Amino acid sequence: MAGRRALKAVLIDLSGTLHIEDTAVPGAQDALNRLRQASVDVKFVTNTTKESKRSLVERLQRLDFHVQEKEIFTSLSAARSLVERKQLRPLLLLEDSALEDFTGIDTSEPNAVVIGLSPDHFNYQTLNQAFRMVLEGAPLIAIHKARYYKRADGLALGPGPFVAGLEFAADCRATVVGKPEKCFFTQALSDLGCSSTEAVMIGDDARDDVGGAQNAGMLGILVRTGKYREGDEDQINPPPHLTCDSFPEAVAHILKNLL
């Protein structure tokens, strides 16, 4: 498979792949620097909805990752693009730190629900407000539907269970804009001017990172850090191009076998 591809881009997940909250994966900074020295473009793609792109860049720079805001494509970016395209006024079920990425969007008299991960606001009143809006015909837009993610204190619920609850209660299906949706990956690659057959994705989520990327035509590398659990690689078809221990090992494989 590698022999027929001319690799031009590497998409890299952030949380669970490069870092877990405020701790970097060992060796990830040096591995990223080695990858940047190769003849390949790098873009960071993330489903995070808990913080703005600016806050995310600041976190990564504190961890000695030399990342610029323009190199990051988030599911928040994809959701804002959809809201603007459809001229919606969203009820934003997001953490306060993520609202910055929707600055300038009209949220008065909302006619749509945009839901991400919002632990501080997921209570009966806000979810019931969203339920009533969707029941009356407002579109439900899920920034992503991840089931869980990795925090420093262990696995934690993602937005997926809350999205599924609203879908069940209102008998509807949400529009999902983040990983593993094919359009998310194609949007991320469009800025780099390359096709999916010229790219590889590295991530810790077998379904959303690797499965989504491979369904979009990319190669997928699964790392055993972050949210990875034993046997995850067996849960998707086709299986990952490679399953390895960590991001540095994934980079070593790319430099040796795919370039």
Image (tube, grey):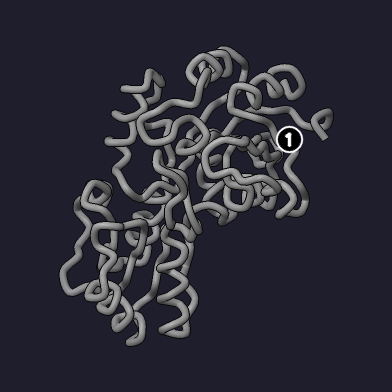
Residue 170 image offset from top left, x and y in percent:
41, 84
Residue drawn 30% across and 44% down? 51
179 left or right of 257 in image = left
Residue drawn 24% across and 62% down? 121
62 left or right of 34 in image = left
**Please, which residue is most extreme toward the left here?**
108
**In this view, 13 is above or below 33:** below
Residue 189 image offset from top left, x and y in percent:
55, 40
Q: Point out the image quarter for the N terminus.
A: top right
Residue 186 image offset from top left, x and y in percent:
57, 47
Towards the viewer: 17 or 41: 17
Three-letter code for the amino acid on which mark 1 is drawn: Leu
Q: Point out the image quarter for the C terminus.
A: top right
**In this view, 37 is above or below 62:** above
Mark 1 nearby-residue class (10 Å; few <14, some 14–19, many ≥20): some
Residue drawn 65% across and 23% down? 249
Question: How many numbered marks appear?
Answer: 1
**Image quadrant assignment for residue 73:** top left
Residue drawn 51% across and 21% down? 26
Residue 55 image offset from top left, x and y in percent:
27, 36
SS label for mark 1? strand
**Image quadrant assignment for residue 105:** bottom left
Towards the viewer: 99 or 25: 25
**In this view, 39 is above or below 103:** above
Towards the viewer: 45 or 156: 156
Query: Which residue is the site of mark 1?
Result: 242
